[in-house]
Image (cartoon, rainbow, N blue to C red):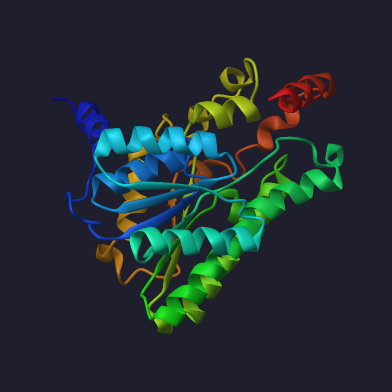
């Protein structure tokens, strides 16, 4: 077997032992689709109870059914707008009522626009900031208060991006929001460490998800701007690779990792900071068609 075959097999294989998360209850925001669903499914396979949240209950319930059928685990689907702190508190209370306690939070909910910044309205800018930064802060605050009061050694895992620390053109609201989540990760790691609460982050590179990439790059744009060409390994990430890392970081095996941000991008950010900087080649009329397709999506 070639080295390539071995590597490809490893990239799609779970790396932790089957009971690595047994007895833990984990909340995944934005858990109904894409990478949130992939990470949550692996948590279930490792024995965790799972709470998935988003604003669309019908999507969550469908996903919960699929997850339970695949893993035999228990999934609680809760509609929650992370921008609203009252929603977050109610979601936490319901999770504790069903599972007895919550052990970890994965802040995965996100929103983004690819656009020249001067084309964005103030509301568009706020929409991204409110979901990514305010939403992550709301969930972290609610869980932190709960863990400190109950003396539970909890774990927060934030999904950021590599451009949180490099910046990137054409996604300025997202870069600002993710940069704020990065600062929050490091700050809470120090402040809440004495309570046994660990706070870490993952900065993924390109991990294609059908829905997200179609919204960001409608039509044939995804083919024209093939992100794997920017990655030194000349491939995009497999969802299981991200799930493996996330599972490790919320497990007890990473108990001495706190305040760390782990990049998993095949070396992309080292090759050229800012995933979307190359979009300067897009002419104005093409931005018009992108904007129209994004609004329809």
Residue 110 lies, in percent from the top left, at: 59, 46
The answer to whether one can see residue 238 in this image is: no
Q: Quadrant of residue 226?
A: top right
Looking at the image, residue 275 sits to the left or right of residue 281; the answer is left
Q: Quadrant of the C terminus?
A: top right
Q: Nearer the viewer, residue 46 or 206?
A: 46
The answer to whether any part of residue 228 appears in the image is: yes
Q: Residue at x 67, y 33 (%)?
A: 278
Residue drawn at x 65%, y 21% is: 218
Question: Given the current orientation, which residue lies at the most extreme bottom position?
Answer: 194
Q: Is residue 163 left or right of residue 243?
A: right
Where residue 145 appears, x then y in whole percent? Answer: 51, 76
Residue at the top extreme, as displayed: 220
- Find the residue positioned furthest to the left: 1
Q: Which one is in front, 27 or 120?
A: 27
Q: Residue 265 at x, y = what percent? A: 45, 43
Instruction: Identify which residue, 143 or 61, lies in the foreground.
Output: 61
Q: Residue 89 placed where, x, y %?
A: 56, 64
The quarter of the rendered structure image containing the N terminus is: top left
Left or right, 43 with reference to 107? left
């Amino acid at each position: 077997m070639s080295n390539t075959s071995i590597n490809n097999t490893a990239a799609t294989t779970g790396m932790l032992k089957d009971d690595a998360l047994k007895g833990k209850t984990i909340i995944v925001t934005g858990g109904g689709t894409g990478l949130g669903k992939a990470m949550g499914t692996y948590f279930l396979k490792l024995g965790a109870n799972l709470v998935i949240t988003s604003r669309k209950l019908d999507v969550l319930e469908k996903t919960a059914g699929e997850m339970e059928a695949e893993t035999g685990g228990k999934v609680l689907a809760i509609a929650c707008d992370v921008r609203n702190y009252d929603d977050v508190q109610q979601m936490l209370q319901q999770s504790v009522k069903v599972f007895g306690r919550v052990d970890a939070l994965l802040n995965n909910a996100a929103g983004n626009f690819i656009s020249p910044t001067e084309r964005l309205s103030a509301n568009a800018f706020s929409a991204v900031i409110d979901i990514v930064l305010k939403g992550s802060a709301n969930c972290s605050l609610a869980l932190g208060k709960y863990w400190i009061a109950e003396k539970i050694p909890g774990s927060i895992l934030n999904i950021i991006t590599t451009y949180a620390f490099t910046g990137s053109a054409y996604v300025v609201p997202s870069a600002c929001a993710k940069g704020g989540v990065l600062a929050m990760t490091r700050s809470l790691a120090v402040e809440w460490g004495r309570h046994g609460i660990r706070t870490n982050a993952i900065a993924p590179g390109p991990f294609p998800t059908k829905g997200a990439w179609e919204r960001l790059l409608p039509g044939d744009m995804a083919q024209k701007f093939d992100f794997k060409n920017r990655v030194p390994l000349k491939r995009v990430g497999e969802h299981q690779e991200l799930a493996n890392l996330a599972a490790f970081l919320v497990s007890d095996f990473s108990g001495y990792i706190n305040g760390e941000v782990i990049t998993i991008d095949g070396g992309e950010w080292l090759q050229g900071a800012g995933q979307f900087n190359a979009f300067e080649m897009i002419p104005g009329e093409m931005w018009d068609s992108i904007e129209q397709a994004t609004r329809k999506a």
